Image (cartoon, rainbow, N blue to C red):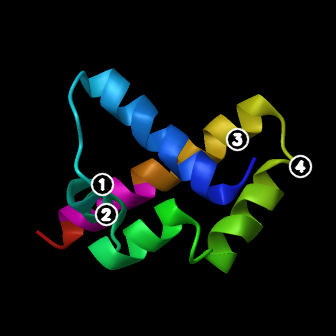
Amino acid sequence: MELRELIRGARALVEAREKRSITQTEMAGRIGIGYRTYLEYERGTNAPLAMKALLNLLTLLDDQEVVRVVREWTQHKEVTNEQHQ
């Protein structure tokens, strides 16, 4: 699976979970990148090396470890956002 397919698939999952369509601009904002960058990722004309490296690293973990890493990141992000408000 190519990275662009993964990005599109993840967006589709978010849309399905929220039961509504999400614009590319909104999705870009949610993940903290610019619209143009997101569009390039989705089209496959730009591939973020850090994202590829992270995905390769996550494939070395079992499912529970992946969930733990994502939850820790989410908690860290929430704490950081609270500190900046």
Q: Earlier in the sequence, mark 4 or mark 1?
A: 1
Of the two numbered discs 3 and 2 on the same chain, state the one appearing first in sequence: 2
Left or right of residue 38, residue 24 in this image:
left
Number of marks drawn? 4
- The quarter of the picture where residue 63 lies is top right
Q: Main secondary structure of the magenta part?
A: helix
Are dots 3 and 2 in contact, CB under 8 Å?
A: no
Q: In 3D space, how far apart are the residues under numbered discs 3 and 1 (Cα atoms)?
A: 22 Å
Question: The residue tagged with tag 1: helix, strand or loop?
Answer: helix
The amino acid beneath tag 2 is: Ala
At x 71%, y 63%, the residue is: 54
Residue 1 screen position, x and y as percent: 75, 47
Pinpoint residue 28: horizontal percent, then vertical percent.
Answer: 31, 63
How many angstroms separate mark 3 from mark 2 (CA)? 23 Å
Among numbered discs 4 and 3, the one appearing first in the sequence: 4
The residue pinned by badge 2 equals 28
Tag 2 and tag 4, C-beta contact below 8 Å: no
